[in-house]
Image: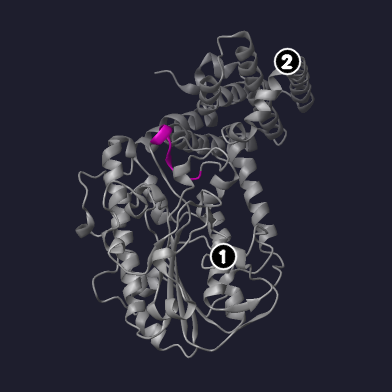
């Protein structure tokens, strides 16, 4: 039996050769998604296309050469340690990049870092373990067995410098390919391994550190009266407008809302991002200066409103509210058997409203909604209307129709959840109340080979950006505001920044922060 450590290749290995071999393997075998994208968008069999492909390949090789040369400066043990870590992460990354068309840009890294283990576990499949074993564990084992002869730091530097100089000269002479590379720089930057997740992780946390520092207070304001007003804001998850029958979908996915009075489905609403944390910031902010000013729940809490935040999800920006409760806490007192899905957020909600000592009440319900890929687990068994459904976390095992069936069932359950929320408000008679539902972003269900969400906004398909925006108002609210839902004139477009100003408008809150042009009822 031949041992790895006894092979001729290993015996002749030097640190310089190890750097070059690691660079070659990483650049070629772990950047399949990168090269596939180029091949799909360039005619590489033409001279111009071939030069673009060659230039892009040179850039990948150069970046990885710098990385591994830098690591070797700290010695072989550090080189191996970091090399093994990179190899394992690369194996995981390439699985999702090739099977889900994931682009590891800054927003996607934020999406990854803000995913709970309970939902991340849904993406752990047998195929992932195979990728991890063949492209992660096995190469890592070989790397650990290597006993490279010392080359010397000066020789390593000289080799790296010489190759870099030649590569830069080639790129300069082939500058005609830069225009294409620059055009797709954001996408390509999210596909280069390991640089995509390394650089974009740093970019994400840098943005976060800036956004939470010294949030500026909005201008002071006041409620115009002390009459009781209840507003429930439901933040949906991964719901796309295309699959709501309220918006013309050919399946009845909103049977309850379609039969309710005083319901408005606002058309042409778009999310500001394709990932949860970014969209939540938009929903709760007054304008595009996200992260620099206090958000809606904090603002109303500061002005004396009773703000209750109930969540079965995550990702909200820093907030200060009267009460913050997550689903696990609510589950401890759940007795009605509806404790595993979003309906847990309605547990004892009526009591919380009635016991409020304040007349201005804002309730935010942040649901788990239609988050994938385990759509089948987002609704109770009784809501499995469309069958057969995809019941695999590895959605490649399912037909697209099975995937759509499971997703549509989540929309039916969302319809039920919204209707039950409205019933809570209807049970409080002769009171001004309003419910608003808006999703954080949409979802891809296999269109154009894309799945899930988080695609960079500039290239994301409409199904990841077009979202449902639904409003219900009590009779007393309609009467006081003199609103006729049958003749309600909608705006041409809506976005998530409408929420902040519409909530203030509903509370008749007077403030310079309020923009009536963004109030959906004005």
Secondary element at image label 2: loop
Quadrant that contains the N terminus: top left
Quadrant that contains the C terminus: bottom right
Residue at the far front: name it.
487
Q: Residue at x 57, y 27 (%)?
A: 26
Check if residue 276 falls in the magenta segment: no
The residue to which callout 2 is attached is 174
Mark drawn on residue 284: 1
Measured as percent of width and height from the top left, residue 54 is found at 63, 16
The residue carrying pointer 2 sits among few (fewer than 14), some (14 to 19) or many (20 or more) residues within 10 Å by Cα, namely: some
Q: In the image shown, does 243 or 114 lie closer to the viewer?
A: 243
Secondary element at image label 1: helix
Measured as percent of width and height from the top left, residue 159 is found at 75, 20
Mark drawn on residue 210: none
- The segment highlighted magenta reads 447-454
Residue 332 visible in rendering: no
Q: Is residue 185 left or right of residue 423?
A: right
In the image, residue 18 above or below residue 131 = above
Measured as percent of width and height from the top left, residue 337 is found at 23, 71
Residue 237 visible in rendering: yes
Q: Residue at x 66, y 53 (%)?
A: 207
The residue carrying pointer 1 sits among few (fewer than 14), some (14 to 19) or many (20 or more) residues within 10 Å by Cα, namely: many
Q: In the image shown, does 392 or 382 lie closer to the viewer?
A: 382
- Give whichever of discs 2 and 1 has the lower sequence position: 2
Q: In the image shown, does 135 or 317 lie closer to the viewer?
A: 317
Check if residue 452 falls in the magenta segment: yes
């Amino acid at each position: 039996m031949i041992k790895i450590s006894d092979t001729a290749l290993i015996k002749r290995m030097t640190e310089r050769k190890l750097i070059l071999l690691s660079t070659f393997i990483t650049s070629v075998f772990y950047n399949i998604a990168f090269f596939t994208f180029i091949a799909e968008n360039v005619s590489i069999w033409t001279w111009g296309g071939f030069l673009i492909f060659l230039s892009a390949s040179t850039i990948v090789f150069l970046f990885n050469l710098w990385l591994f040369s830098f690591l070797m400066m700290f010695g072989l043990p550090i080189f191996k340690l970091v090399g093994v870590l990179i190899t394992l992460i690369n194996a995981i990354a390439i699985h999702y990049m090739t099977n889900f068309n994931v682009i590891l840009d800054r927003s996607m890294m934020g999406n990854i870092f803000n995913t709970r283990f309970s939902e991340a576990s849904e993406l752990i499949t047998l195929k992932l373990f195979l990728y991890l074993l063949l492209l992660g564990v096995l190469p890592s084992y070989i790397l650990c067995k290597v006993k490279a002869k010392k080359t010397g730091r000066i020789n390593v530097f000289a080799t790296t410098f010489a190759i870099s100089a030649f590569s830069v000269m080639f790129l300069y002479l082939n500058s005609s390919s830069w225009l294409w590379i620059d055009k797709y720089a954001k996408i390509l930057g999210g596909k280069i391994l390991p640089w995509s997740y390394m650089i974009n992780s740093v970019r994400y946390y840098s943005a976060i550190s800036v956004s939470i520092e010294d949030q500026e207070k909005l201008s002071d304001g006041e409620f115009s009266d002390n009459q009781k007003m209840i507003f429930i804001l439901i933040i949906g998850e991964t719901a796309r407008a295309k699959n709501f029958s309220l918006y013309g979908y050919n399946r009845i996915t909103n049977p309850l809302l379609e039969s309710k009075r005083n319901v408005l489905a606002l058309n042409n609403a778009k999310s500001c991002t394709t990932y949860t944390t970014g969209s939540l910031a938009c929903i709760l902010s007054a304008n595009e200066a996200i992260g620099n000013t206090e958000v809606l729940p904090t603002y109303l809490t500061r002005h004396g409103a009773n703000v209750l935040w109930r969540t079965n999800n995550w990702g909200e920006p820093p907030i200060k509210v009267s009460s913050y409760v997550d689903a696990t806490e609510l589950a401890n007192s759940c007795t009605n058997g509806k404790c595993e899905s979003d309906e847990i957020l309605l547990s004892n909600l009526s009591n919380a409203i009635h016991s409020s000592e304040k007349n201005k009440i804002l309730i935010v319900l942040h649901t788990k909604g239609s988050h994938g890929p385990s759509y089948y687990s987002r609704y109770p068994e009784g809501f499995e209307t469309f069958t057969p459904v995809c019941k695999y976390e590895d959605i490649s095992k399912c037909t697209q129709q099975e995937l759509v069936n499971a997703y549509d069932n989540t929309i039916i359950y969302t319809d039920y959840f919204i209707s039950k929320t409205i019933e809570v408000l209807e049970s409080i008679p002769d009171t001004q109340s309003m419910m608003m539902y808006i999703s954080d972003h949409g979802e891809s269900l296999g269109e154009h080979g894309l799945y899930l969400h988080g695609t960079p906004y500039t290239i994301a398909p409409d199904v990841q950006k077009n979202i449902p925006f639904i409003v219900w108002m009590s009779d007393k609210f309609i009467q006081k505001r003199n609103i006729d839902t049958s003749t309600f004139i909608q705006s041409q477009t809506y976005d998530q920044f409408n929420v902040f100003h519409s909530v203030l408008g509903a509370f008749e809150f007077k403030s310079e922060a309020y923009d009536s042009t963004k109030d959906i009822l004005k």
